[in-house]
Amino acid sequence: MTNAEIAASGAGVDAALRRAADVMPQGLALFDAAMRLVVANRRYGELLELPEACLVPGVSLQDIALFLAERGDLGAGDPAVLAAQRIAMLTLTPESVSQRQGRFGQVLEFHARRMPDGGLTVSFADVSARVAVEAELERVNLSLEERVGERTAALTRVNAELEIARAKADAANLDKTRFLAAASHDLLQPLNAARLYTATLVERTADSGLAELAGSIEASLGAVEEIMTALLDISRLDSGALQPRAAPFAISELLKKVEVEFGPPARAKSIEVRLVGSDGMVLSDRLLVGRILQNLVSNAIKYTRPGGRLLVGCRRHGARLRLDIIDTGIGFSREQQGLIFNEFSRLEQGARMAPGLGLGLSIVQRLVAALGLGLELDSVEGRGSRFSLYLPLVHGAYAAASPAPPASAAALNLSGVRLLCVDNEAAILEAMSGLVGGWGCEMRVARSLKEISRDGLIEGWLPDLVLMDYHLDQTSGLDAIEWLRHNIGGHLPAILLTADHSPQVRTLAEERGIAVITKPVKPAALRAAIAGLWRGQSPAGSSVSN
């Protein structure tokens, strides 16, 4: 893979993120610690009617404010003084909300927040309609005692307006949910290809001078994935699109996934990971509990120094099972406990150790509340932390007593495995071929069932396993797997690769005995899943947390 191809993959991700920001109805801008513009979306320039010179990265907040003051947007007076006052209002406090009139009399509401690195985020929107309704309500309230008849009419009118506003808000919320479903697929597809390319690059440059560069690219894409996944999770939770579905499951299932997903990054930092399982069955939403565990373990590894220790273990606590995540990381003080669950809140030492937006624990808090579970934390600054999640036990039901030991290198040997990969994105097929080809697999690829039939890909050649994208152009991946099983044999093992994280897709896959890996695909999880299915070690229909 050339540097140009790597740059093109990264550019695709950046372009997708910018398209997502540009469809937001609010203006949004980010300034660095020197108060110079880093990036702004299209709506920012439209609402303020700024010239191109004021939207170029690197332009100072002072220059933008001075332009607005000289144009008259900030009122009458000395433009320099008005600009300085405006900047002070936005920057002197950690967070501020202010309103002012726009150039044509509209009311603009600004939300400004200082970032941990000293930078500044500014978002704003035209709230003229809301202010007008508030003003009308105030006028009606002042005249209530004198004009009871007018009061009744006014309240009726206002209620009608509020009902219309509520209906519009409900429609907007539905549109938001639909947008997120589409955005998650469109944004994660190029990111998935980029991560597969970089995984191949990392493996092939392990002993060369490019190893450090490849590792840096992979780390940067991992940071983008983490931020994107966090923002999509928060949006799904806040919009109500993510609904818990409680069912009994073995807690040992989640501990197995911890080893698959977090074993490699822990070993890369020489962090000793110990798993203490349980034979208990718990009642909750397996996928959402897995997401909580994923965020807590990810944080533990991220904020534990090389050579540290991590324990993920279970113990019975009355009618509940306590799931502990205990690390020897940087920890935090009692005074800081109230801050760590806030959105975009990061402790200074943690911000120096690892990149991120500070959304992981905010998502954990939302998920714990949605599931009605208990979360306990204890930490000593400089010595480590303990997060304990309490889950209701299903009495009389038992599973395997402990998680399986980590797969050995021999168990993950895929030499000679015949794989058929179907995805409508050529870049993903190319990246996947490069990755699994390096594992010794014999791989054939296609973009559709029609292409498989036209090119005779399975004539005289039977795959051991199928990797299938969920969103194909003319059918779903689940139906495509059924077609292949009908033509090849009902025993054909299959893994569904999808950017759709909804429980509905997983349920449909499990009903058909199909494993699921969510995009962006993590190579370690993919390799473990292929090895398990090929050797018959994983039950059909299992889901791989990714």
Image (cartoon, helix red, strand yellow):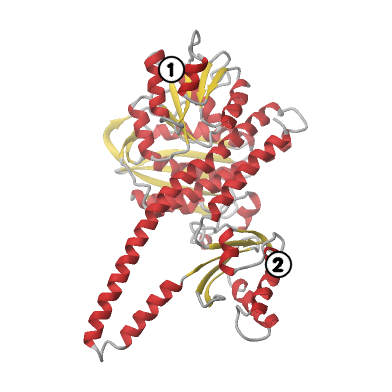
> Is there a contact, CB below 8 Å, between mark 2 and mark 1?
no
Asked whether residue 375 is in view, the answer is no
Return the residue found at the far right: 209
Quickly name the residue at label 1: 536
Mark 2: give few (<14), some (14-19) or many (20+) Cα within 10 Å: some
Query: Which three-letter amino acid code belongs to the residue tagged 1?
Result: Gly
Left-right relation of 519 to 323: right
Of the pair 75 and 309, the residue shown nearer to us: 75
Query: Which three-letter amino acid code belongs to the residue tagged 2?
Result: Ser
Residue 479 position in % (x across, y down): 38, 26
Return the residue found at the far bottom: 146
Residue 227 versus residue 336 in the image, above or below: above
Say which quarter of the image contains residue 397: top left
Residue 198 versus residue 380 in the image, above or below: above
Asked whether residue 190 is in view, the answer is yes
Residue 331 position in % (x across, y down): 56, 52
Quadrant in the picture for the N terminus: top right
Residue 425 position in % (x across, y down): 54, 32
